[in-house]
Image: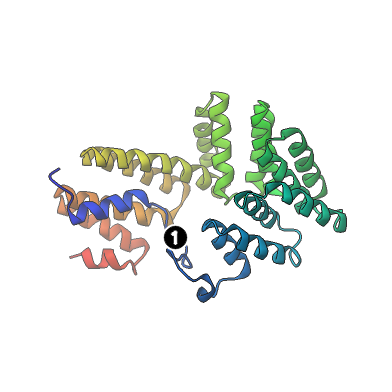
Amino acid sequence: MNGITEKAVLALSVLFFISIPSAGAVENPSHPSELNLSARQKAGFLLARKQYEEALQVYKSLLKKESEDGSLFRGLVKAYDGAGKLNEAENFIKDYLSAHPGSSAGQYGLGYFYYLRGDDSRAQARFEEAVRLRAGNALAWNNLGASLSRTKSYTLAVEKVKEAIRLDSSNPMYYNNLQRIYRELGSAGLFIADYNRYVKEGPRLVAQGYGRLIATTMRQEAFQHYSQGSLDSAIRKFREIVVIFEETGYRAGLVSVFFGLAVLHEEKGDEEMAQKYFKDVLSINPNHLQAREKVK
């Protein structure tokens, strides 16, 4: 390719972003207080921005009202860690558990503290207590699996993470963790085998979770092909992603993939195929402004 055209820049951006951001997504806002964020969203925003001290205060405030949400404890511990005060998290959570001795979320938070500190024995004990108190604590099951994998107990680790996926099938973190464990086990192909089984037997939401992660790897491969000037190879990878999203019924993902294929064909000079894929986009999302502008 000779230089980077405007179309190429667009294609590159599409290759990077297959999934559609949520309607509430905001890029690089400078004043979160002006965005009408909920307290929970503000805490996550501050954590992502590495404003750890501010995030800590919001998480602490939230935990006074929503004690059985493990994600708040996870955020709290990460904020302590980011602020260089990880050891203070232990005292805070232990004080909390003294006042709330039956808290599964609190036990998870203490386990997550030990996990970040590398103390897998204590972490596993807390995660096990968390799921004993509330069997539906998916975060605790997932982290128990992550900790077990660090101690080479891979079979048990897979079992625990799969329980997290069963309980909360829409959380991509659990699929990432499972894939990593399979790789550490030296059996990366088991992830594909799981995917094929769920495609055939369901549940569909689980098949989508596996499929979206597999598609992420394909997206990265497509980008590599594109950056090397091989449009045909990038297009082949995108078509493989189409198969995965069609198999799993992930129509929202198909919008972005079809648009990517349209742009790549346009870059290639194949206007007929570009138009086909732009129309495919509109068949799913008639309000897609960029596709509407492209259709002749």
Q: Which residue is mark 1?
A: 21
Specify the color scheme: rainbow
Asked where in the image residue 271 lies, by quadrant, the reply is: bottom left
Q: Position of residue 118 (x, y in %)?
A: 68, 35
Asked where in the image residue 98 lies, by quadrant, the reply is: bottom right
Q: Residue at x 69, y 30 (%)?
A: 156
Q: Residue at x 54, y 75 (%)?
A: 36
Q: Quadrant of the N terminus?
A: top left
Instruction: Tell me: 99 left or right of 112.
Output: right
Q: Position of residue 148 (x, y in %)?
A: 68, 32
Q: Is residue 53 in view from this perspective?
A: yes
- Determine whether 70 is above or below 120 in the image: below
Q: Residues within 10 Å of mark 1 (few under 14, many from 20)?
A: few
Q: Nearer the viewer, residue 94 or 111?
A: 94
Q: Residue at x 76, y 48 (%)?
A: 90
- Determine whether 239 is above or below 63 in the image: above
- Determine whether 139 is above or below 252 in the image: above
Q: Nearer the viewer, residue 159 or 34?
A: 34
Q: Secondary structure at mark 1?
A: loop
Name the residue type under label 1: Pro
Q: Nearer the viewer, residue 113 or 185?
A: 113
Instruction: Tell me: 252 left or right of 41.
Output: left
Q: Is residue 136 in view from this perspective?
A: no
Q: Position of residue 290 (x, y in %)?
A: 28, 65
